[in-house]
Image (cartoon, rainbow, N blue to C red):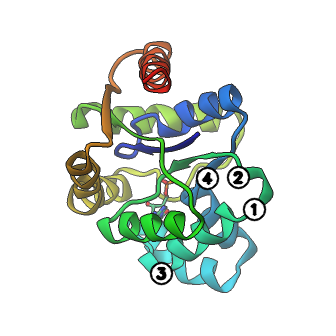
Amino acid sequence: MRLILLGPPGAGKGTQSQRLMQRFNIPQLSTGDMLRAAVKAQTPVGIEAQKIMSQGGLVSDDIVIGLISDRIEQADAAHGFILDGFPRTVAQAKALDVILAQKHKELDAVIELRVDEAALLARMEERVRQTIAAGQAVRSDDNPESFRLRLEAYREMTAPVAAFYAELGSLHVVDGMAPIDDVSAQIDAFLKAKAST
Ligand code: AMP
């Protein structure tokens, strides 16, 4: 099962990825997580990405395409994966096509979690509250100003990715405003229906 989860920051991609990961026993490949690890380790990629990320901008296509291309090669991704936060630009989506074609692999589904933008800031603030309550470190881009820029980046650069897959006929939209279990149920129902066609 090779899936892409699309949706703006705070749409619930991470939560749904975790569930799909357990259900299908495949890894979640999050370019955001990979980049945060690179920043933490202060690798050359991390040093380059750090400032852009904390400001809510997009890291260069070359960097994230390189990360994903290497990650897909790893053994745990041989039977599938869930892409979370990638592709974020049409150039990344086209590069992914090429990478998969070279490996003779295909995408099974592209699922967009569609949400009401007005609710997203409140979700981010709730995530910050829960993170602090759990005694964990808050992401440097989880603040209103960076969040506004992340939303803008989504509108400008990533919304066209959904349009790209819609044109290819591979986009499936679910209601990301529904409770978490209902969103999971919508995704499950879609995947089940797809598997039986
Ligand atoms: P995320 O954890 O997916 O919200 O990503 C956090 C930040 O990492 C984003 O705001 C971007 O700065 C950067 N990032 C993650 N994935 C990508 C990507 N596919 N393309 C460009 N930048 C990315």
Q: Residues within 10 Å of mark 2 (few under 14, many from 20)?
A: some
* Mark 1 in CB contact with mark 2 (< 8 angstroms): yes
Q: Amino acid at mark 2?
A: Ala
- Secondary element under disc 4, as helix, strand or loop, is strand
When the figure is inspected, residue 26 is found, relative to residue 57, above or below; the finding is above
Residue at left offset 53%, top offset 50%: 83
Q: Which mark is residue 74?
A: 1
- Secondary element under disc 2, as helix, strand or loop, is helix
* Mark 4 in CB contact with mark 2 (< 8 angstroms): yes
| CA distance for labels 1 and 2 | 6 Å
Residue 77 locus on image (x, y percent): 70, 52
Q: Nearer the viewer, residue 29 or 109?
A: 109
Q: Which residue is mark 2?
A: 77
When the figure is inspected, residue 40 is found, relative to residue 14, above or below; the finding is below
User: Is 139 left or right of 71, judged from the image as shown?
Assistant: left
On the question of residue 67 being in view, the answer is yes
| CA distance for labels 3 and 4 | 17 Å
The quarter of the picture where residue 193 lies is top left
Q: Residues within 10 Å of mark 1 (few under 14, many from 20)?
A: few
Q: Nearer the viewer, residue 48 or 189?
A: 189
Q: Which residue is mark 4?
A: 29
Q: Which mark is residue 62?
A: 3
